[in-house]
Image (tube, grey):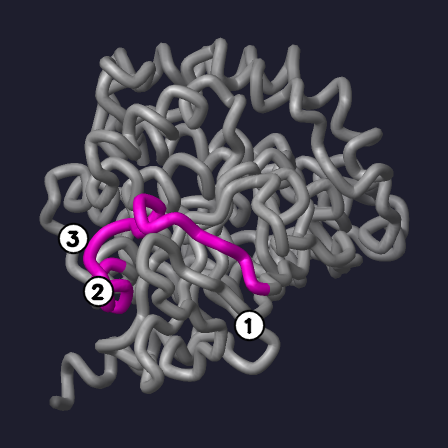
Amino acid sequence: MKRQIFTPEHDAFRETVRTFLAKEVLPHYEQWEKDGIVSRDAWLAAGRQGLLGLAVPEEYGGGAEPDFRYSAVLAEEFTRAGAAGLALGLHNDIIGPYLTSLATDEQKRRWLPGFCSGEIITAIAMTEPGAGSDLQGIRTSAEDRGDHWVLNGSKTFISNGILADLVIVVAKTTPEGGARGLSLLVVERGMEGFERGRNLDKIGQKSQDTAELFFHDVRVPKENLLGELDGAFVHLMTNLAQERMGIAVAGIAAAEHLLEITTQYVKEREAFGRPLSKLQHIRFEIAEMATECAVTRTFLDRCIVDHSAGELDAVHASMAKWWATELQKRVADRCLQLHGGYGYMTEYRVAKAFTDGRIQTIYGGTTEIMKEIIGRSILS
């Protein structure tokens, strides 16, 4: 089915993204994978190309374009290219809304120009060694000392953790913490007591720096409070739908691309004197995956349109997230199987997609958490 959600302007943007990937990302990506981190030059190049701060007002150097379809194009093309390391989606779609909707005018002037140019790389620190999806379990705390906070605690699995110049930290600002006692504090590179642990060794997305962060009596100025005091829980819940949509969009794009390259592979690969595509079992496998992708694509495109119009609710975002990422996981596994022994070789795209994509059902809220959100909405 021909997709009907994009305009000529979106198509032109897609070509821009493809050109950027071909010139600034793919020639360097193998080295980034070996290094375990992307070059800061790539972030600066993305800024020059206008790929950062898509929804940020023009006065701060952004694109002033809140239409989520542009973000969807970016996610789809980076996924098809297998370039998960340069986490523009995290920067634009997850952290960007916190800065544009919660920051004061002074904070916007201080942070947004660098955010859009690529000079300021961002991260958000929620997950802790003992608290993943359960925000109620956060132990990192900030003590009010009059004109500043004193921040103590640790975070783990933080994407952009090594490169980040600005980290939004979720911390307890009351002894109880929980839904009514968490705040967002912005920690900046160079603050005394802010330390980064090791760049974590993952099974996939090797070039995406993921780190442990430590806060030892970090003095955070009062002007670095983002949003309402003790209001982080509401702020986090407000922005999670977009985060989950970004992951879902990448999920269906990955599944479709894997199906595409596997279809070509089984046409060319021979066994017992004839192409694999002549075997009924292979045709059935391809037919099942093609149908699942087509049905999922229809739902995801509807969610993209609804979200662009500000009409997507948390429940449907959760549906999109768990369904698309579980589909991606199934398709990756089946496509690797159809590649046989070659599928286990890292030089083949399917092998890398298998390991890079495995995190999709975990971060941004696990599949189980997504089902809990949906189930509660129906049964409460």
Q: Is residue 253 above or below residue 65?
A: below
Name the mark on residue 312.
3
Query: Residue at left 54%, top 32%?
Result: 78
The x and y percentages for residue 355 are: 71, 56
Tell me which numbered mark, 2 or 1, is placed earlier along the sequence.
1
Tell me which numbered mark, 1 or 3, is placed earlier along the sequence.
1
Q: Is residue 280 visible?
A: no
Instruction: Please tell me whether mark 1 sits on a helix, a strand or a loop.
Output: loop
222 in the magenta segment: yes
Name the mark on residue 128.
1
- Badge 1 local density, few (<14 within 10 Å), some, or many (20+)? many
Q: Is residue 167 above or below residue 128?
A: above
Instruction: Please tell me whether mark 3 sits on a helix, a strand or a loop.
Output: loop
Please, what is the three-letter code of the amino acid marked with disc 3? Answer: Leu
- Distance of mark 1 from mark 3, alpha carbons? 29 Å
Image quadrant in which the N terminus is located = top left
Task: Identify which residue, 347 or 196, lies in the foreground.
Answer: 196
Compared across the picture, whether 32 is left or right of 50 comes to right
Compared across the picture, whether 157 is left or right of 4 comes to right
Query: Residue at left 20%, top 31%?
Result: 105
**Which residue in the structure is indicated by mark 2?**
231
